[in-house]
Image (spheres, rainbow, N blue to C red):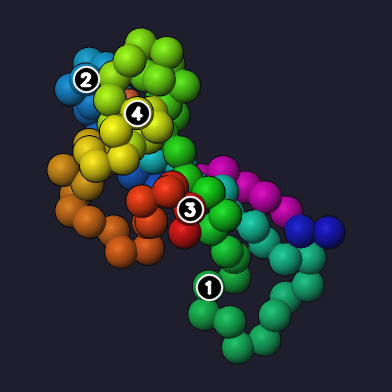
Amino acid sequence: MATIVWETVSQHWCDLMNQEAELLEARVYPADILPDVGVPYQVSARKCSLGISCNLAGYACRWSYINPGYDPFEEKFGRDPSVSLHGRG
Ligand code: SF4
């Protein structure tokens, strides 16, 4: 059975929430070790640790699912080509 682990991949001070926020990704590790695989997991989803609160508060950004065109993590660290606009790798 595969194992899913949420890992923090980035964190920053979010100016909209005025507190520290973490970008998390769900890493799926297969039950069996696969030969000749560069990364031993697949990323199935990404989210901000404060995304639900921001959605309820109306803060518009990609990770609160209100404004897919604005990513505060990208603003500070640049575009990660492995992160799609839909929050899935
Ligand atoms: S969901 Fe967006 S606005 Fe809210 S803390 Fe995360 S990056 Fe900031």
Q: Which mark is residue 89?
A: none
- Packing grade of label 2 (10 A; few <14, some 14-19, many >=20) is few
Q: Residues within 10 Å of mark 4 (few under 14, many from 20)?
A: some
Q: Nearer the viewer's eye, disc 2 or disc 1?
A: 2
Quadrant showing the N terminus: bottom right
Q: What amino acid type is highlighted by mark number 3?
A: Arg
- Label 3: which secondary element: loop
Q: Nearer the viewer, mark 1 or mark 3?
A: 3
Image coords of residue 19 (percent x, y): 27, 18
Mark 4 residue element: loop
Q: CA distance from mark 2 to mark 4?
A: 13 Å
Whether the residue carrying mark 2 lies under 8 Å from ligand 1 is answered with yes
Which label's residue is closer to the chain start, 3 or 4? Answer: 4
- In magenta, the rendered stretch is 3-7
* Residue 88 numbered tag: 3
Q: Is mark 4 within 8 Å of ligand 1?
A: no
The residue beneath circle 2 is: 16
| Vertical arrangement, residue 81 with respect to residue 75, above or below | below
CA gap, disc 2 and disc 1: 34 Å
> Secondary structure under badge 2?
loop
Residue 89 seen anywhere in this rendered image of the structure: yes
Q: CA distance from mark 1 to mark 3?
A: 16 Å
Mark 2 and mark 1 lie on one chain; the one further toward the N terminus is 2
Q: Residue furthest right?
A: 1
For disc 4, the marked residue is 66
Report which residue position mark 1 lands on: 39
Q: Secondary structure at mark 1?
A: loop
Q: From the viewer's perspective, is 71 left or right of 65? A: left
Instruction: Using the rendered view, name the quadrant where residue 13 is placed.
Output: top left
Q: Measuring 57% from the left and 64% from the top, which residue is drawn there?
A: 42
Say which amino acid is labelled 2.
Leu
Is residue 22 at least partly visible in the picture? no
